[in-house]
Image: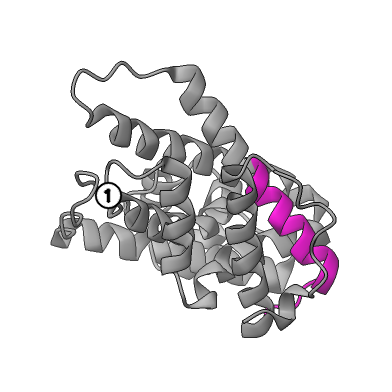
Amino acid sequence: MQSDSLESGTPGTSPTPPSRREKNKAATRQAITDAALALLRSKGAGNFTVEDIADSAGISRRTFFNYFGSTDAALASMTYGFLDSALQQFRRRPSREPILESARAALLELADPMTVAPLAELFTLIQQNPQLSRSELEAWDHCTEQIITAARERFAAAPGAVIDELYLRALAGSVISCGKAAMDVWFARGGADMSPASLSVLRQLLIDAIGHLGSGFDGHALSESTPLEDRH
């Protein structure tokens, strides 16, 4: 399910500010997500229902289903805030800039390491609760579709553009694979550490992974001698 908080705009320009209705919908979505996360922390995976989430968020069951199709979908939405922020930055990049350079620059603009906290927390919870794997799949599927949409917008702006769907989907899949690799390395190094320092490492790993993709993975496998945490 697509996030309602994504803002549209022409590549290279500022996105249109959200309306009051969009802000209210985003607030309701966030309340549902917060409630689902709180219940996951207190009760554990599989031990709460849609009704529990709705009661905790102060909404009706019907309202819940206006936003999400299941508890898994609500949990998967923890990653949407990070993705929304990254895509907003991407859409502000110059339309003629190489697309992977724009993607890396968008991540660099997210200077606050806490922007990756939702992404990191869902990933960490999934490692601790394998039954949440469906949430992970939904989250990455959402990310893939939104990357395809953003890339299509970029290419469609070119005069006489004929968009290659294979290129778009291969690109999105490659970006997602790099993101997953960064998450795996981060978790292997620090486990469930959600401190600002650890999240800063994750942010840098995501940036570096896109950099490797942009360079065609050109001979960097054995070149890193300085620990990532010591970089400036």
Q: Residue 16 is drawn in which quadrant?
A: bottom left
Viewer-proximal residue among 97 and 22: 97
| Relative to 219, 168 lies left or right | left
Viewer-proximal residue among 165 and 19: 165
| Relative to 140, 25 lies left or right | left
The secondary element bearing badge 1 is classed as loop
Q: Which quadrant does the C terminus fall into?
A: bottom right
Q: Where residue 37 sits: x, y (%)?
A: 59, 67
Q: Where residue 109 sits: x, y (%)?
A: 41, 68
Name the residue beneath numbered marker 1: 94
Q: Residue at x 31, y 16 (%)?
A: 162
Count of labels shown? 1
Going by the numbered disc 1, the residue's amino acid type is Pro
Label 1 Cα neighbours within 10 Å, binned few <14 / some 14-19 / many ≥20 = some
Q: Which quadrant does the N terminus fall into?
A: top left
Q: Residue at x 63, y 75 (%)?
A: 199
Relative to 39, say whether 149 is above or below: above
Q: Residue at x 24, y 45 (%)?
A: 11
Q: Residue 202 is drawn in which quadrant?
A: bottom right
Relative to 45, say whether 157 is above or below: above
Viewer-proximal residue among 163 and 117: 163
Q: Where residue 85 sits: x, y (%)?
A: 39, 61
Q: Where residue 43 sits: x, y (%)?
A: 72, 68
Taking the image as drawn, is residue 99 in sight? yes
Viewer-proximal residue among 129 and 104: 104
Q: Residue 164 is drawn in which quadrant?
A: top left
Q: Residue at x 52, y 38 (%)?
A: 144
Taking the image as drawn, is residue 47 in sight? no
Q: Which residues are magenta?
A: 177-195
